[in-house]
Image (tube, coloured by chain):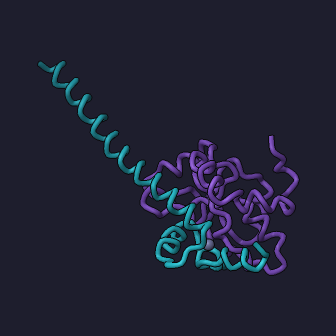
Chain colours: A cyan, B purple
Amino acid sequence: ATDNSKLLKYRCSGCIAVGKSLNSRNFSKLLHSCSYQCDRHKVIMETEDRYKSELRKSLICNKKVLLTPRRRKRLNTES
Amino acid sequence: MFQGQRAWFCRSVSGELQQFWVTEGGRISVPGAADFLFSCDASHPDTLRIYQSLDYIEDNATVFHAYYLSAVANAKIKNSVALGHFLLPPACLQEEIRGKIGNFIWEQDQHFLIEEHNEV
Ligand SMILES: [Zn+2]
């Protein structure tokens, strides 16, 4: 690819946005709301999104695992 | 350039880059209160803690490579550097992403990096 087409490929709101408005708190939302992500940002975002949903699931699982045996143990010692 | 902004730095970020942030008017804070989260190593325990936080899972905490700051330091027009090029995804995802889109931009633009960051 020529330099020009490379540049065009890099231009989505995640690429163009500069200055004070962007930070760690709003970047992800900006990228998600952008309807024409470049290849680069699209791939990163999709991979992270998949990872986040796995984390979310394991977080819910962990809570259950952590809560249930502990409670059970306490019941056992009490009885 | 960073007046009124707060940043958190992973201990993987050199003192030099943190100093640049402060010189440009930025303040350093705890992760929960920071506008910016900077790291040079996605697998550093400090940064791992961010990736495991609820903020991260809920899309409220994007980690950026601190080379953004050296890019700003070296840019002719300081606020012309796109922060979005310095996304730092979790280490366990980087290989997969690299396979699809090649090196990260913070891996490609090594020429402007401060000498301290020689690969170990
Ligand atoms: Zn983009």
Q: Name the residue rendered at 66%, 65% in the picture.
A: B27
The answer to whether residue B17 is above or below residue A65 is below
Q: Where residue B44 sits in the image (x, y, percent)?
A: 63, 43
Which of the 4 image quarters holds residue B89? bottom right
From the viewer's perspective, is B31 left or right of B70? left
From the viewer's perspective, is A54 left or right of B9? left
Q: Name the residue rendered at 71%, 57% in the picture.
A: B103
Total numbered circles: 0
The quadrant of the image that shows the C terminus of chain B is top right
Please state which of residues B71 and A11 is positioned toward the viewer in this rendering: A11
The answer to whether residue A9 is above or below residue B45 is below
Q: Name the residue rendered at 51%, 77% in the picture.
A: A34
The quadrant of the image that shows the N terminus of chain B is bottom right
Figure quarter occupied by ligand 1: bottom right
Q: Where residue B10 sits in the image (x, y, percent)?
A: 65, 51
The answer to whether residue A79 is above or below residue A37 is above
The answer to whether residue A63 is above or below residue A41 is above
